[in-house]
Structure formats: structure tokens, C-alpha cells
Image (tube, rainbow, N blue to C red):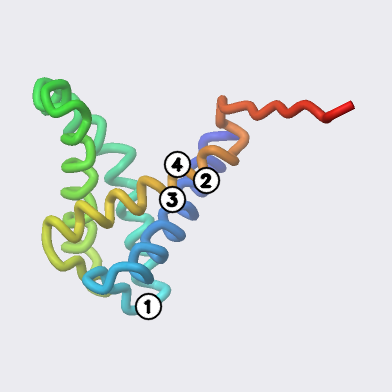
Amino acid sequence: MHKLQYILYRICVNVIGIGFTSLIMEKVNVQSYTALISAALILTFFQAFLRPLLFFLTLPFQILSLGIGYMVINSLLLLLTANFIEGLQVGGFWTAFLGAIVISLVNLIFDGFSSRSSVKVFYHKGN
């Protein structure tokens, strides 16, 4: 997958993740499709550029918290995205934390089926 295709793939998965999160969580509201797409664009940008920097800066905390700090960073990025996009409302930090978990799970599911996935599934037909 080329870099541009991968970026578009990430944006589409974030659209699905944010949309699904807004469907199952009542404190995450998306007012329109343009707000949803804009939020996915901004969140993808933050995930590509801010998340690695924040992860590096908080590396000792990441190690001590056994990775929970990574979800805190994702929560803060979701809250930051909601501050930039007028049509996206997130009800607070814990709502953003749960929303980041849902978005991460959606990303995990889609990454399992992508062509960049290193997961291989083999099965054996019976005799």
C-alpha cells in the first residue's frame, strides 16, 4: 500500500471509528457528516504527528503504566480534536478515554484485515 493510500485508509477507518463511537456512546455527539469527516482528518493528522512525539516525551510514564498512558494520549488527542471541530462534542476525559478505546478497537479490527497486516490465518481442511 502506498503512503497516500495508507493515509486515506487511516482517514476512512477513523471515520468509521468516530461514527461507531458516537452511535454507542451518548456523550460523544457528531452533528453532521462534514463534522465526522473533518474530525477524522484532524484525528488522523494528530495520530500521525503528535502521538509519536507525546509518546516519546512520556516514555517513562508509558513503561511504568504498562501502556495505559498510550490510551491517555489517545484520549487527549480525541479531546483536542473535539476542541478543533465545532460539530464534535465529547463529554469529558473519561468519555474520551472510553471513546479512544472504541476507536482503537475499530482500528485493530480493520488493521487485522488490511493488506499491511502481518497476521496470517491458516486452516486445515479435514480429510
Q: How many numbered markers are drawn?
A: 4
The Cα–Cα distance between marks 1 and 2, rounded to whole angstroms, is 23 Å
Image marks 4 and 2: residues in contact by CB distance under 8 Å: yes
Q: Residue at x 40, y 47 (%)?
A: 105
Q: Are marks 2 and 3 in contact (CB under 8 Å)?
A: yes
The mark that comes first in sequence, 3 or 1, is 1
| Whole-percent x, y for residue 119 in the image | 57, 27
- Judged by depth in the image, the label closer to the viewer, 4 or 1, is 4
Which residue is located at x 41 percent, y 64 percent?
20
What residue does disc 3 label?
A: 106
Which is more toward the observer, 6 or 14? 14
Label 1 packing within 10 angstroms: few (<14), some (14-19), many (20+): few
Tell me the element at label 4.
Answer: helix
Circles 3 and 4, Cβ within 8 Å, touching? The answer is yes
Q: Position of residue 38 (x, y in %)?
A: 35, 63
Local packing at callout 3 (Cα closer than 10 Å; few below 14, some 14-19, many 20+) is some
Q: Report which quarter residue 99 is drawn in.
A: bottom left
Q: What residue is disc 1 on?
A: 32
Q: Amino acid at mark 3?
A: Val
Q: Give the mark toward the camera: 3 or 1.
A: 3
The single residue placed furthest to the front in the displayed view is 127
Asked if labels 1 and 3 touch by Cβ distance under 8 angstroms, the answer is no
Front residue of 18/54: it is 18
- Mark on residue 110? 2
Which structural element holds mark 1?
Answer: loop
Q: Tag 3, which secondary structure?
A: helix
Q: Are marks 4 and 1 in contact (CB under 8 Å)?
A: no
In 3D space, how far apart are the residues under numbered discs 4 and 2 (Cα atoms)? Answer: 6 Å
Q: Is residue 88 left or right of residue 37?
A: left
Residue wearing tag 4: 108
Q: Is residue 57 visible?
A: no
The mark nearer the N terminus, 1 or 2, is 1
